Image: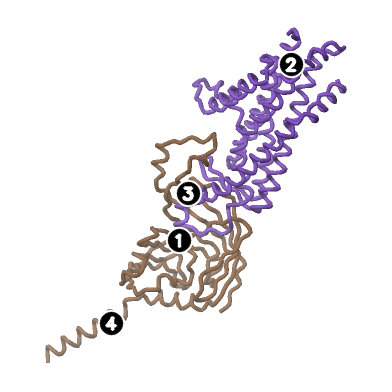
Chain colours: A brown, B purple
Amino acid sequence: MKKLLICTLLLFTTVFAQAQQVDKDLLKIKKRMDSVKQFSASLVLDLDVPFIQMPTKTAKITYTEGKKMMFTSKDFVMLPKRGLDFSLSEIFKYPFITVDRGTEKLNGRLLKVINIIPTTNQSDLALATLYMDTKAVRIVQSEVNTRKEGSYTLLMNYAQLKDILPSYVEATFAIERLKIPLNFMGKGTTIDRKKMRSMETKTGKIKMQIKNYNIKH
Amino acid sequence: MRLLLSAELLKLLKQSKTYYALGAILVIELLILITAYFQGSTILDLLLDNLKQSFYFEGSLLNGNLIMYIVLNSLWFNVPLILMIVTSGIVTDEYKDGTMQTVMLQAVHKWKFILAKYIIAVLFTLLVIGFMMLTTFILAYSLFGNGDLVVYLNTLNFFEANDAFHRICWAFASGAISMVFYCVASLTLSIFIKEAAKTWIAAALFLIITTLLLKVDFVIPALNRFFFPKLIDSWQQLFYYVPDWTQILINNAILILYTLAFAAVGTYVFHKKDIG
């Protein structure tokens, strides 16, 4: 009888633990994000990288569920490879578990912090930390470590409390120094080797203002 | 003076050397344009290689503006060489053909005569640069289209198409001042040397030395800033993200002063020299 009780308890604990592997608030956010079937918006991009000088650029983004995000621009624009995945499809692509890290106050808001740990090697994701606004059901900040594409941090601001999609995204990432072909260097250009070495890896930032959303649910 | 100028202009237009020079510039331009296209794609691949890891690129950087910038970098050695040969010929041909003595037998002021040659040399140079600018613009934009320009000058600078076009126009204007300087210098050399072949060698040497001195650090700041070899590539400063317009204007103004000084020395020497 005692053995049966222990076995039942063990089985119940395992089932309960599996059910708890993905955070409920994250699933709620995912469900809310999934309600967006299509959207288009205009982007205003500001690149902040120590060795790149670029004027403010504009572009248009179009998203359709299940398809890659499309960008169009009259000018030459550089868009971050990571950071525009609002649907969280990259995270949900492969199985993972979440670890509750408690709460943290960020800019006066109390946010729930969770870690996302993939359970398969297929995922490029190594570890992600998400800061969730559980009241507004949306992600405010994420720190993502990938296996192949380095680490990046995303900071999202929303225009209104009810908004699902952000009005401002700031992506911070590590960037390697430039390899400059000598024949492209201007005559006035000088090579400061010490400075070049100290610039091996730098932190870059791209600030995106997202306006004129046209969302279809 | 007007008659002297029209006579000099007629001589320049009548000599086949002028058209050979224009033809040579067009050939050089075409060759540079073709190599610039291949060079441009390699440069972009190398420049943007590590940025590709973090970014998607929308739009093309291999366009008319990049080609124009590469052309600008390549032209400023070949073109002055041709211009110096043609403009020095304005004086050396007169010595060779013996027409110098004939003209001097007329009631012509020596200083006015040589000044007319300087003015025509300057006009010819400006005409060639204008021709070069127009043909390169037509070829570059019609073949490669318009778009943003990327330049590496200590930082990777991106310019919007319109901004790039304006900077390239100003770069041609600044480059034209450098070309005028070279032409005036070669004309002055021809007054001293008189012989065509020797003048060409001296002019080529002058061009090579000036180009080499451009990179030399003279230790003395004033020399590094105001010595004429240091002012030759002021056009390059227009491709800094925030160009120092005052510095660019000062550099070009000083180069104009050098040009005037070279012309003044030439005129004075010619005026004092016996024709023979």
Label at residue B95: 2
For marks 2 and 4, give the CA distance. Answer: 106 Å
Q: Is residue B43 visible?
A: yes
Res A76 → quadrant: bottom right
Structural crowding at the residue carrying mark 4, measured as other residues with C-alpha within 10 Å and reported as few (<14), some (14–19) or many (≥20): few
Quarter of the image with the C terminus of chain B is: top right
Classify 10 Å Cα crowding around label 3: few (below 14), some (14-19), many (20 and above).
some
Separation of marks 4 and 1 at Cα, in angstroms: 32 Å
Answer few, some or many: residues within 10 Å of disc 1's Cα (few below 14, many 20 plus, some between 14 and 19): many
**Quadrant in which residue B110 is drawn:** top right
Q: What chain does badge 3 belong to?
A: B
The amino acid type of the residue labelled 3 equals Leu
Q: Nearer the viewer, residue B71 or A28?
A: B71
Residue B88: x, y in percent? 70, 23
Cα–Cα span, label 1 and label 2: 76 Å
Give the number of the mark in front: 4 or 1. 1
Q: Are marks 4 and 1 on the same chain?
A: yes
Q: Are marks 3 and 1 in contact (CB under 8 Å)?
A: no
The residue wearing badge 1 is A154
Residue underneath mark 4: A16
Q: Which residue is mark 3?
A: B46
Q: How crowded is the residue under tag 2: few (<14 C-alpha within 10 Å), some, or many (20+)?
A: some
Task: Inspect the image, locate mark 4, and give the three-letter code of the amino acid beneath it.
Answer: Phe
Q: Is residue B146 visible?
A: no
The kind of residue on which mark 1 rests is Leu
What residue is shown at x 81% (from left), y 24% (from top)?
Answer: B8
Question: What amino acid type is highlighted by mark number 2?
Answer: Tyr
